[in-house]
């Protein structure tokens, strides 16, 4: 399986990258990012790109892939709807639209989050925007698309969040999170479980397009 990864420098993306590099069934990983990941590996190639609303300049390098793991995303904290929508919906759809055109056999997996609002009309701004993003991704002509909706995510293997307040919470609450992961799989998963689940879903499919924490942990 040849994989394109977005968000490889982030907390979720670092976890997904780790599992891809460890999995013998993943032949290669192309990471598309705006900053270097700082990792070297025989299976890993990196493209640095600065305009995530327009991928025309690197289009020729995005064909021939079996799966895209889209882990790029931002927290909505302190952002107005227009800005959050630009960084969430517009970037994701710009990337996914070109990938669907170039790779009709691709499986596309998007990380949204627990509580995402498929009706696009609820009270929570972030949930509406992620809901619209999910809904429109599911309409693109991929072989299949899956929406991962994790709740809490425990970073493992030294992985850190790029968002300072998120990282602080994870460090302070680490023992509680380990416990929660065991006793409340509906509310907690790990970067390792997400990475492994993405690879399995891309390879074998899943009975439904939206996967909650419990689905991710079961895989
Ligand atoms: N962390 C959680 O507990 C959690 C829980 C549920 C859902 N999620 C979702 O999972 C996704 C990833 O979260 P995360 O915790 O991994 O975030 P993170 O650690 O903050 O990483 C964000 C990633 O997105 C990239 N990125 C952000 N803005 C960008 C832009 N304008 N252009 C290009 N790249 C950009 C970052 O690249 P740079 O390195 O260049 O900044 C980084 O690779 C998000 O959609 C989030 O809502 C997270």
Image (cartoon, rainbow, N blue to C red):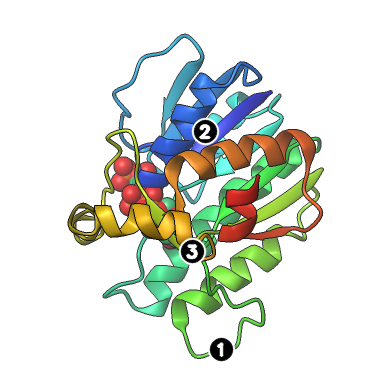
- Which numbered disc, 2 or 1, marks the residue that appears first in the sequence? 2
Residue under pointer 3: 184
Secondary element under disc 3, as helix, strand or loop, is loop
Q: Residues within 10 Å of mark 2 (few under 14, many from 20)?
A: few
Residue under pointer 1: 122
Q: CA distance from mark 2 to mark 1?
A: 37 Å
Residue 12 pos. (x, y %): 42, 45
Residue under pointer 2: 57
In the picture, the quarter occupied by the N terminus is: top right
Front residue of 171 and 182: 182
Residue 188, visible in the rendered structure: no
Residue at figure coordinates x 34%, y 78% from the top left: 80
Residue 108 pos. (x, y %): 67, 45
| Vertical relation: 75 (above or below) 110 | below
Residue at figure coordinates x 77%, y 49% from the top left: 206
Residue at figure coordinates x 53%, y 38% from the top left: 195
The image quarter containing residue 64 is top right
| Closer to viewer: mark 1 or mark 3 | 3
Residue 95 pos. (x, y %): 58, 46
Secondary element under disc 2, as helix, strand or loop, is helix
Outermost residue, bottom direction? 123
């Amino acid at each position: 399986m040849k994989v394109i990864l977005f968000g490889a420098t982030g907390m979720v993306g670092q976890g997904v990258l780790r599992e891809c590099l460890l999995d013998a069934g993943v032949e290669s990983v192309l990471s598309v990012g705006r900053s270097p990941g700082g990792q070297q590996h025989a299976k890993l190639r990196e493209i640095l790109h600065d305009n995530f609303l327009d991928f025309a300049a690197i289009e020729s390098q995005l064909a021939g892939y079996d799966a895209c793991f889209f882990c790029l995303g931002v927290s909505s904290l302190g952002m107005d709807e227009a800005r959050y929508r630009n960084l969430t919906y517009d970037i994701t759809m710009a990337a996914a639209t070109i990938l669907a055109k170039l790779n009709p056999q691709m499986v596309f997996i998007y990380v949204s989050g627990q509580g995402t609002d498929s009706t696009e009309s609820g009270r929570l701004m972030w949930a509406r925007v992620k809901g619209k993003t999910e809904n429109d991704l599911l309409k693109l002509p991929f072989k299949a698309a899956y929406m991962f909706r994790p709740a809490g995510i425990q970073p493992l293997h030294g992985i850190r969040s790029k968002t300072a307040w998120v990282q602080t919470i994870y460090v302070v609450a680490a023992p509680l999170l380990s416990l929660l992961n065991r006793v409340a799989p509906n509310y907690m998963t790990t970067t390792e479980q997400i990475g492994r689940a993405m690879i399995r879903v891309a390879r074998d499919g899943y009975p439904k397009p939206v996967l909650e924490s419990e689905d991710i942990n079961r895989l």
